[in-house]
Structure formats: structure tokens, C-alpha cells
Image (cartoon, rainbow, N blue to C red):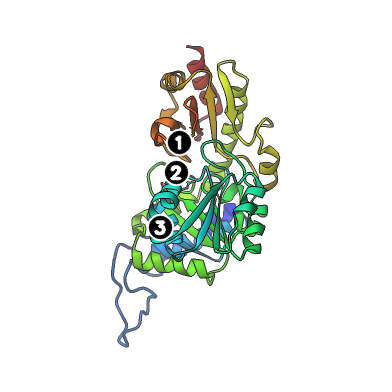
């Protein structure tokens, strides 16, 4: 079935007692055991599993074209579960501009547990190949990247991983399963911060790992971490996320259309130094993005002529677009990344990242035009 249909139906079923069509929220942490000690309803204790999480995971697996998914309380908890499933002495390759939280894991936290990591420019396939060692167990792909929206060739990175006997994981948060399907290109695992497009309303935190096959050894480790570590979403969070997913394909396409229009407008403005958006022909990843994505997503970054002061002043003059971090919500926002990232971050000082929401594009254009004019 097509993604619009999966978004509405996957994981949902009529509740048997009262025949309710909307999925109920099962708050119970415990489930009655059978006389023989078995679990006749399929559940025993909600950390290990519960009906709302099960429904969500079935839907996430369907959207990504995988066979199993594990839901977490945040994207970072999902990342953590993957890294904890590796062994001391294993080596990971990741992009230099990987999500900042993932850098902290690879650079500061996991080395003390014996995990080795190389951060390379993954838009250059030769650099990925050059970083492979005999102990490389995981190639971590993230495309488009944040905040420069750089594009990595998923197929090439997956091939290098598999030749090396390593797992290929793609953080698919920015594209969402609507615009890009890493598992269909050969990746073993896809990661989502469901806080972003899947949640889409700036009101929940969550994460997920989707696996090409439930028996995949690294995914088995992830499942074990989830059920035993307990960094799991509440039943309510699972319910809210599943409800949000119903409209995902329609939201993401409209957000990408808005981003395309506003990015094209900004690129022509004299006060703008450059716009980073893979949907612009000027972007170095344009051709590759066209090949592996259906549209170019709802996120772009702009470098304003001048420095941090000019960028912050421009953001302050916006009236409709809110100054806030994060991305993927129905409401548009703008983020001065340099303020948020640590001092050593290489993000340009004059860069603003825009996440386009579902407002009418004319109102968004009027907002940026007004902020430029002053
Ligand atoms: C936000 C984000 C994460 C981390 O997810 P949280 O839900 O904030 O923990 C990981 N990867 C990418 C690409 C993200 O945007």
C-alpha cells in the first residue's frame, strides 16, 4: 500500500471490547497473567511492551518499508541504544556534521566505553572508504545534514559498509520516510527523531529505530536495550505520535513546497549571502538529492550578509516565523545555530536555519520580505 494509506491504517485495529475505531490509550503498566502463568493478552509489563507502543512500531516499520521498529523516548535514546549494542573495540564512521548530540556520544561519551569513531566528510565517498578499518562495525549516515543540508550518497555508503562487513544506519530524521527510504536503498537500519517530522506538532519527544529485518543482530541488541534499559515512550506519547503520523505525508509535502518557494525567494535577495537548500540548483548536492529523495524537505539555512549581529537582527524582525530550535513542526521557526551550538562548532555566525511549517506560503514570503526591508 502507498504511504498515505499506511500512515492512516498501519498498526491500527478496532478495539475488541467496545469496537472503538480510534485506538484507546492503555495506561496500565501490568497485564493479567493466565492460570498457567502465560500472557494470554500478549503483554505482561509495559516497559517490555504495551499495545500503544506495538501499534506505533508496526506503523513506523510500514512507513520505512522495514519489518520491525523499536520506539524510544527520544531520538538520542535511540542513538544511544544503537551505540550500546556495539562492543568495546568496535569502530564507527560518521559524518563530521552529524547531529551534534551524536557527536557528543561518539567523541565524549562512548570512547570511555572503548568504542572508536572516525568523523569524516561523507559527501566525499573516498573519505568514507579511506576511514574503513578491520574493526569497522557501523557506518552512520545522516542525509540531508544539519544545518548545511549536505547530501551523502546513501547507496555508495551502504556498499562500503557491506563490503567491510559493517552495518549501514541512516538517520532519516530530516527527510522523513515520505521523501527518502534508506532501507529500500540497502541500509540495514533507519533512525528517526520522531520529535521532528513524524511528531510534527512541536509537542512530543520521541525516537525510533526501524530495521530491514527483525532478526538483524544489531537490531536485536537495540530491542534488548529498549526493553531492559527502559528509555521508552509513554503510552500517551505513542498514542499522540501515531495520531500525528496519520497526516505525515500531506504535511511533509506541503512543508517541502513552502521551503522550496521561500528558499528560491531568499536566494535572489541582495541582503542574503547564500541559501543552503538541496532543492536549489546552486546546491552542491542537488543532483544527488534529486536521485535519492522525492522532494527536498522543509528545512533550509540562510547566510545573511554581515555577521551574527545582522543574522540575529533579521530573525528578530520576523513576526510570523518563531525564534525556536527544533524542526519539522506545523509552525515555521528560525534558529540561529551558532548561539545554540558549543563554541567549537564550525557553523557560520551569520547562518539562520529555517524550518517551514504549514502556513500559507504568501504569508511566509511576506514575513521574510518584511524582515529584509527594515
Ligand atoms: C533532533 C535530532 C536528533 C536527536 O533527537 P531528540 O529527539 O532531540 O533526542 C537526532 N538526529 C537528528 C538529525 C535530529 O534532528
Residue 345 tag number: 1
The residue singled out by tag 2 in the image is 100
Q: CA distance from mark 1 to mark 3?
A: 27 Å
Q: Which element type, helix, strand or loop, lies under badge 3?
A: strand
Q: Earlier in the sequence, mark 2 or mark 1?
A: 2
Foreground disc of the pair 2, 1: 1
Residue at the spot x=59%, y=18% of the render? 269
Tell which of 80 and 246 is nearer to you: 80
x and y, in percent, of residue 90 in the image:
49, 63
> Is the residue marked by circle 2 packed among few (<14), some (14-19), or many (20+) residues within 10 Å?
some
Q: Is residue 111 left or right of residue 164?
A: left
Q: Is residue 93 above or below residue 165?
A: above
The residue singled out by tag 3 in the image is 72
Q: Is residue 51 above or below residue 144?
A: below
The image quarter in which residue 323 lies = top left
Q: Residue furthest bottom?
A: 36
Q: Is there CB contact under 8 Å for labels 2 and 1? A: yes
Q: Earlier in the sequence, mark 1 or mark 3?
A: 3
Amino acid at each position: 500500500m502507498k504511504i498515505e494509506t499506511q500512515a492512516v491504517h498501519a498498526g491500527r485495529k478496532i478495539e475488541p471490547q467496545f469496537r472503538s475505531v480510534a485506538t484507546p490509550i492503555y495506561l496500565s503498566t501490568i497485564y493479567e497473567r493466565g492460570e498457567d502463568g502465560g500472557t494470554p493478552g500478549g503483554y505482561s509489563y509495559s516497559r517490555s511492551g504495551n499495545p500503544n507502543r506495538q501499534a506505533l512500531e508496526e506503523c513506523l516499520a510500514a512507513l520505512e518499508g522495514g519489518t520491525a521498529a523499536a520506539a524510544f523516548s527520544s531520538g538520542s535514546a535511540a542513538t544511544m541504544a544503537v551505540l550500546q549494542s556495539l562492543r568495546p573495540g568496535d569502530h564507527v564512521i560518521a559524518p563530521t556534521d552529524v547531529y551534534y548530540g551524536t557527536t557528543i556520544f561518539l567523541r565524549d561519551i562512548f570512547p570511555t566505553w572503548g568504542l572508536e569513531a572516525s568523523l569524516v566528510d561523507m559527501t566525499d565517498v573516498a573519505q568514507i572508504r579511506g576511514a574503513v578499518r578491520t574493526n569497522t562495525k557501523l557506518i552512520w549516515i545522516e542525509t540531508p545534514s544539519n544545518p548545511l543540508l549536505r547530501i551523502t550518497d546513501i547507496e555508495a555508503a551502504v556498499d562500503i559498509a557491506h563490503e567491510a562487513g559493517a552495518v549501514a544506519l541512516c538517520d532519516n530524521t530530516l527527510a522523513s520516510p515520505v521523501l527518502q527510504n534508506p532501507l529500500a536503498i540497502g541500509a540495514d537500519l533507519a533512525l528517526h527523531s520522531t520529535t521532528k517530522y513524524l511528531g510534527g506538532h512541536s509537542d512530543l519527544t520521541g525516537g525510533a529505530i526501524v530495521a530491514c529485518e527483525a532478526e538483524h543482530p544489531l537490531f536485536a541488541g537495540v530491542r534488548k536495550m529498549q526493553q531492559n534499559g527502559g528509555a521508552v515512550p509513554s503510552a500517551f506519547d505513542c498514542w499522540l505520535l501515531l495520531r500525528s503520523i496519520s497526516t505525515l505525508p500531506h504535511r511533509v509535502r506541503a512543508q517541502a513546497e513552502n521551503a522550496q518557494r521561500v528558499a528560491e525567494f531568499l536566494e535572489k535577495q541582495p541582503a542574503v549571502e547564500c541559501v543552503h537548500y538541496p532543492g536549489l540548483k546552486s546546491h552542491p548536492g542537488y543532483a544527488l538529492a534529486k536521485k535519492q529523495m522525492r522532494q527536498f524537505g522543509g528545512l533550509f539555512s540562510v547566510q545573511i550578509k554581515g555577521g551574527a549581529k545582522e543574522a540575529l537582527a533579521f530573525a528578530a524582525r520576523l513576526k510570523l516565523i518563531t525564534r525556536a530550535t527544533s524542526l519539522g513542526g506545523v509552525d515555521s521557526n528560525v534558529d540561529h545555530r551558532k548561539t545554540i551550538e558549543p563554541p567549537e562548532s564550525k557553523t557560520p555566525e551569520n547562518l539562520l536555519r529555517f524550518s517551514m511549517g504549514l502556513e500559507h506560503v504568501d504569508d511566509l514570503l511576506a514575513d521574510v520580505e518584511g524582515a529584509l526591508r527594515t
